[in-house]
Image: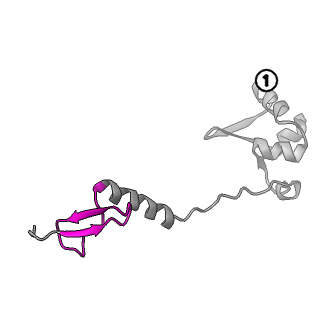
Amino acid sequence: MSRLRFKRNCVECNEEFIAKTMATTTIYCSLKCYKRNWRKQKKVNTVVIPKEKPIITKENLQNKHYLSVKEAVVFFEISENILRRKIKENKLNYVCLKNRFLFLKSDLARIL
């Protein structure tokens, strides 16, 4: 550490401080200002990709053999409550994958 002292202005808070190392390397007055500036830079450089959910239509579901709850509601034009009630009453055959119900389209057509 050198014995030279330099007066500098902090990049983050613009307050004057005494730099104890070389004048070219010290640009923040404290660790707090350094972290604050680092968070700002990280936020600016982060790219956010919005997730777009596909729109479910009857035409898209014509070729599918298995339907989820939302797809079955659109395809058969029934309410989600009716479908969930049928599941609860064990009137529908379904497969549960990762908390997602899948139905065979022919079973749904037979029951509804």
Residue nearest the observer in this picture, 12 or 67: 12
- Our reading of the magenta stretch's main secondary structure is loop
- For label 1, the residue is 89
Q: Quadrant of the N terminus?
A: bottom left
User: Is residue 10 shown in magenta?
Assistant: yes
* Residue 96 rendering spot, x and y as whole percentages: 66, 38
Q: What residue do we see at 81% from left, 28% from top?
A: 86
Does the magenta portion include 35? no
Q: Residue at x 70, y 58 (%)?
A: 52
Find the magenta span and give its range: 6-31
Q: Position of residue 23 (x, y in %)?
A: 22, 74
Q: Nearer the viewer, residue 88 or 15?
A: 15
In the rendered image, the vertical position of residue 66 relative to residue 39, given as above or below: above
Camera-nearest residue between 22 and 99? 22
- Residue 91 visible in rendering: no
User: Residue 103: x and y, percent?
Assistant: 76, 41
Judge by depth and name the residue closer to the eye, 40 or 86.
40
* 81 in relation to 52, above or below: above
Give the quadrant of residue 73. Answer: top right
On the rendered structure, is 96 left or right of 111? Answer: left
